[in-house]
Amino acid sequence: MDKRYQVFVSSTFLDLEEERRQVMQALLELDCIPAGMELFPAADETQWSLIQRVIDDCDYYVVIVGGRYGSTDEQGVSFTEREYDYAVAHGLPVLAFVHAEPGAIPSSKSELEVEARKKLEAFRQKAQKRLCKMWRTPEELGGVVSRSLVQTIKTKPAEGWVRARHATSPEQLNALRTRVDELTRELEQARVAPPAEAEGLAKGNSVFELRYQYYYVGYQHEIIVLTWDEIFATVGPAMFGEASERQLKQQLERKIEADKQLRGQNLQVNEEDFQTIKVQLFALGLIQKNTRKRTASDTQTYWSLTPYWRAVRNNLEGDPR
């Protein structure tokens, strides 16, 4: 009887997007069912219950450790480590994949805080005490995961999933359908709940100083103070379908031009500040990166609104309907 195994993939996200893509592809090529944070934002207590149930339904657990420890819960434990500890405690076969050269990871994908680096190193050591493989590139990681999982399936065969026609009784089919319905409802609830890490982030009426420059007898450098509600109300309407990063910048530049009456003066927002805005809105659960395939010539990054933004839009003065 053919089985398909469900594999939970745990890691930090923004710094390991390409690595996760390679791992997901490797799992699909093995006819496995990937499960992970792509299905839900991380994680308040309600969502943590959903994550636990998804891990419980998995046959194997994969953790990828790169250069970041990640967002933490109230006890200061990262959600990645929390998932790892849960999988170990519940007896899942755990496969850990740790970056072989953490010092070679770019600073933009590494922890800068001393305390976070200490926690990351402790987590690296913990992960290496179990079945662990090292990796350096996303492509190498995909291959290492594939080979390791094939070997683990041979030595530690799991229950797996079978096609419905092979189910032994109508009762089992009904139980599976009920389980799917439960997880679907919980997933929908999780999608419209705020990420746990948003609790401590600046938002709403908190202000952000956005630097910009314009040309007037030479380049002039100034700052505009905007609330996060104003920023989101400015860029939000562009993302009903999707918007490129350049389009989002243009939305901010048009607002500054209008507020400061600087039209036609080659105004540009500061790139570092724009990246901060983008990461902040992502961390607040308001925007998501689009991943659909595009032509090879289209190298832009596109963003759209998340289901969660509907839960907060009525609180925004600029309600982007």
Image: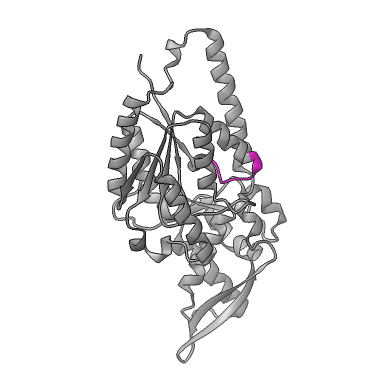
Where the N terminus falls, by quadrant?
top left
Q: What residue do we see at 56% from left, 46% from top?
A: 42
Please tell me whether residue 87 is drawn above or below residue 111 in the rendered image. above
Q: Nearer the viewer, residue 205 or 293?
A: 205
Determine the image quadrant of residue 15. bottom left
Q: Is residue 192 visible?
A: yes
Image position of 259 (left or right of 253): right
Q: Is residue 45 magenta?
A: yes
> Looking at the picture, how far across and down is residue 217, in whole percent?
47, 92
Q: Nearer the viewer, residue 207 or 111?
A: 111
The count of marks equals 0
Image position of 152 (left or right of 93): left
The residue segment tinted magenta is 40-46
Q: What residue do we see at 31% from left, 36% from top?
A: 148
Q: Nearer the viewer, residue 238 or 223?
A: 223
Magenta-highlighted stretch: main secondary structure?
Answer: loop
> Looking at the picture, how far across and down is residue 85, in whole percent?
52, 41
Q: Is residue 320 visible?
A: no
Q: Is residue 133 magenta?
A: no
Please tell me whether residue 318 is drawn above or below residue 166 in the rendered image. below
> Looking at the picture, how far across and down is residue 219, in whole percent?
46, 87
